Amino acid sequence: MVKAIIYKPSKTSTQSGRQNTKNWVLTYTPSPQKADSLMGWIGSGSTMNQLKLKFSSKENAINYAIQNGLLFEIREPHLSSFKEKSYAENFTIPK
């Protein structure tokens, strides 16, 4: 049986925007890969590794997995905390 992972992607460290963090993503777990005997290239017979399905909510992704008979694992997002500071706080002397 095919296994899937449902997660909400985190913000990339090189960008400040949060555009790609709004949707939930369903990806399939990678299938075993083997080396081609003639060329030596690595590959597999399954194209499921290339799929990345986006859903507007976690419930929609779970419903899709259930309807298609997939075993799935849910990875909850880690929410970061942001402490707003002013520029003047850089120069205050700690007590």
Image (cartoon, rainbow, N blue to C red):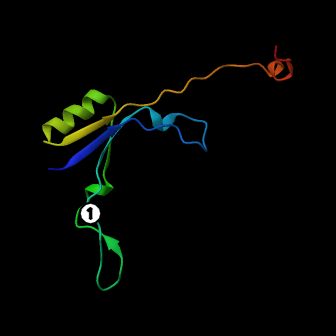
Q: Position of residue 45 (x, y in %)?
A: 22, 67
Image quarter hosting the C terminus: top right
User: Which x, y percent locates residue 23?
Assistant: 39, 34
From the viewer's perspective, is residue 53 above or below residue 43? above
Q: Foreground residue, 35 or 16?
A: 35
At 30% across and 86% down in the image, what residue appears?
38
How many numbered marks are there? 1
Q: Is residue 25 above or below residue 87?
A: below
Judge left or right: residue 77 versus residue 55. right
- Counting from the top left corner in percent of width and height, residue 52 is at 33, 48
Dot 1: element: loop
Instruction: State left or right for residue 81 relative to residue 76.
Output: right
- In the rendered image, the residue lying farthest to the top is 95
Expressed as whole percent of the image width and height from the top left, the position of residue 87 reads 80, 22
Residue 78, relative to residue 54: is it above or below?
A: above
Which amino acid lies under the numbered mark 1 shown in the image of this protein? Pro
Report which quarter residue 9 is drawn in.
Answer: top left
Residue 75, by quadrant, is top left
- In the picture provided, is 35 more to the left or to the right than 95? left
Residue placed furthest toward the front: 95
Judging by the rendered image, the residue that carries numbered circle 1 is 32
For residue 68, which quarter of the picture? top left
Q: Front-most of 52 and 39?
A: 39
Q: Residues within 10 Å of mark 1 (few under 14, many from 20)?
A: few
Residue at horizontal 64%, vertical 20%?
83
